Image (cartoon, grey):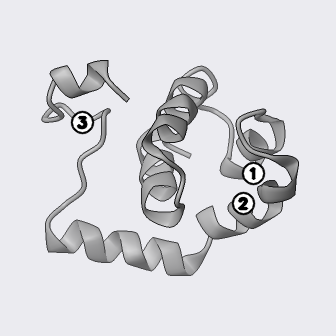
Amino acid sequence: MEIRDFLIRVKVGTNLGIKKQYQIYQEIRKSPELSIAEWIGTTKLIKESQKDELTATLQSEQLTHEIQINEQSGGILTILDEMYPKLLREIY
């Protein structure tokens, strides 16, 4: 899975805080070849008791549909996008 898509799924599909999202971004940059399930299975950033539910949520068709609606409505900008403000890359 592409890192950008993964970041969007974490942002739109979870209630994880911005600091946790940034930690996830830092970690997945090191292993972009991992699938969602593989990353969740190996990370220490997510509690064991939450891993199955998070995997199901991030891979759900409902989330895919919600992301498509967001992209059609106004687009989605991530830290990986060229238009993302440089100073925002410096903070969580």
Q: Which mark is residue 55?
A: 2
Measured from the top left, where is residue 48 in percent x and y?
86, 49
9 with respect to 91 (left or right): right
Callout count: 3
Write down the quadrant of residue 61 in the picture.
Answer: bottom right
Find out whether the residues at labels 1 and 2 contact each other: C-beta distance under 8 Å: yes
Q: Which residue sits at x=50%, y=73%?
A: 63
Q: Which residue sits at x=78%, y=57%?
A: 50
Q: Which mark is residue 24?
A: none
Q: Earlier in the sequence, mark 3 or mark 2?
A: 2
Q: Earlier in the sequence, mark 1 or mark 2?
A: 1
Q: Which residue sits at x=29%, y=77%?
A: 69
Give the Cα separation between the discs numbered 3 and 2. 25 Å
Tell which of 20 and 40 is nearer to you: 20
Q: Which mark is residue 81?
A: 3
Q: Which mark is residue 37?
A: 1
Disc 3 is placed on an element classified as: loop
Give the Cα separation between the discs numbered 1 and 2. 6 Å
Q: Give neighbour class at mark 2: few <14, some 14-19, many 20+ (Cα, 10 Å).
A: some
Q: Amino acid at mark 3?
A: Asp
Q: Earlier in the sequence, mark 1 or mark 3?
A: 1
Reply above or below: 54 against 85.
Answer: below
Q: Amino acid at mark 1?
A: Ala
Disc 2 is placed on an element classified as: helix
Measured from the top left, where is residue 60 in percent x and y?
61, 74
Measured from the top left, where is residue 57 in percent x and y?
64, 69
Reply above or below: 68 against 36.
Answer: below
Find out whether the residues at labels 3 and 2 contact each other: C-beta distance under 8 Å: no
Q: Amino acid at mark 2?
A: Thr
